[in-house]
Image: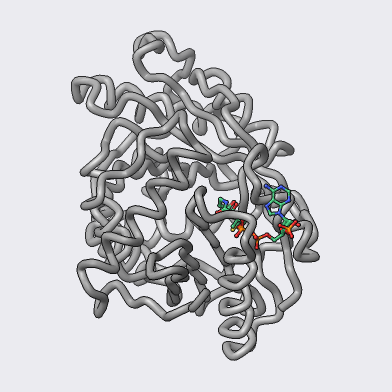
Amino acid sequence: MTVTPFDPRLGLREQLACWHEVAAAASAHDDPRHASLPPAARAAALLAPRPDGRVRRWLGCADGAVVGLAELFLSDRENLGWGFAEVTVHPRHRRSGHGTALLAAMRAAASDAGRDTLVLSAMRGTPGPAWAAALGARRAQELWESEADLGALDPAALGDRPAPGYRLVSWSDEAPEELLASYAAAVDAMADSPDGGLGYESAPNTPELVRARERCAREAGLQRRVVAAVHEASGAVAGLTVLEIPLLAPELAHQDDTVVVPAHRGRGIGLWVKAEMVRRLAADGGVVRRLHTTTDPSNSHMLAINDRLGFRLVGVREQWKLPV
Ligand SMILES: CC(C)(COP(=O)(O)OP(=O)(O)OC[C@H]1O[C@@H](n2cnc3c(N)ncnc32)[C@H](O)[C@@H]1OP(=O)(O)O)[C@@H](O)C(=O)NCCC(=O)NCCS
């Protein structure tokens, strides 16, 4: 196999099409429950910049066709010894060493960038974990993937209650300027969520990073919606939940951060903001049909809230660490 760097911003239209073809074939094979992303949505995601680091990509070709893809994310803010690597081989071309060859390219690039560890992420029940183990990687964390079917929920009976002394504020895409600083600080409280032993270290969030994330999400074709609980006495954001809706495939939205600042915990704010998000989606007429979320199995508070909102386990994602 030949492995060549691929920059979607400079790439040929044919290369983008090949990337989509391999990704779509792998997703239909490994994840048949979900419809594959439309080509335009995948292209938007490939072309969007990252606010917090750089992404390098490679195409793997054999017998004149693209048969594998590799993507390496190098954060420039946190976990500076790591590279987050993804390898995808077309299902018809597996077990021929292509995945291993693509990984070798990423290992070299990670090493050149001064990283000592690759973090690989694979769904249990697909070939990914056995492949990672064969390469000498170590399983470091498991995460539960859950989904909620919004059509099966009664938005008026989600069991949440307003927290006295707090009001809800919601927005799409851009945080209101007057809440920006306290919103950025509240997101920081995510740092104490359990990471199951992976050893992830978060750098402090900033208002500039919030704005950069908002811009990048827009460029990637994602609508970012936020419901926040504001503490009336201080005017500060006390808790929040973020949802990302792919505008070209809105049926399945991804539940991003949900966090309550430690001083405001124990008042039902986590359930309240998430339930409000669900009510707002229902009021939109049901364009978003299902929500997807990823939770560490030891995060019992979040799991209890998700259970109340109808989330059910659909799979287990494993994170593997491989010395470079
Ligand atoms: C995981 C994946 C990348 C492997 O690609 P591949 O080209 O088939 O892998 P390789 O041919 O390099 O396999 C190397 C070794 O890994 C192990 N391996 C790979 N697939 C395996 C499977 N399905 N079952 C058991 N062991 C497997 C074997 O030891 C294999 O050597 P062998 O074929 O000589 O026995 C591919 O199945 C894929 O794209 N999966 C979906 C995405 C994914 O999970 N990526 C990995 C995490 S980033």
Q: Please provide percent x and percent y for residue 136.
A: 80, 65
**Which residue is found at the position 25% from the left and 51% from the top?**
39
* In-front residue for pair 292/26: 26
Residue drawn at point x = 71 percent, y = 80 percent: 116
Q: Tell me which residue sits at (41%, 57%) in the image.
A: 182
Above or below, 283 relative to 64: above
Scheme by which the image is coloured: one colour
Q: Is residue 89 visible?
A: yes
Q: Quadrant of ligand 1?
A: bottom right
The percent coordinates of residue 42 (x first, y second) are 30, 54
Is residue 306 found left or right of 119 in the rendered image?
left
Residue 115 percent location from the top left of the image: 65, 82
Which of the pair 259/66 is nearer the observer?
66
In the depicted structure, whether residue 52 falls above or below residue 155: below
For image coordinates 32% across by 68% down, the residue present is 212
Q: Nearer the viewer, residue 76 or 138?
A: 138
Q: Quadrant of residue 245?
A: top left
Q: Is residue 231 visible?
A: no
Q: Quadrant of the C terminus?
A: bottom right
Quarter-of-image position of residue 11: bottom left
Residue 90, image x and y in percent?
A: 48, 53
Query: How many callouts does the rendering have?
Result: 0
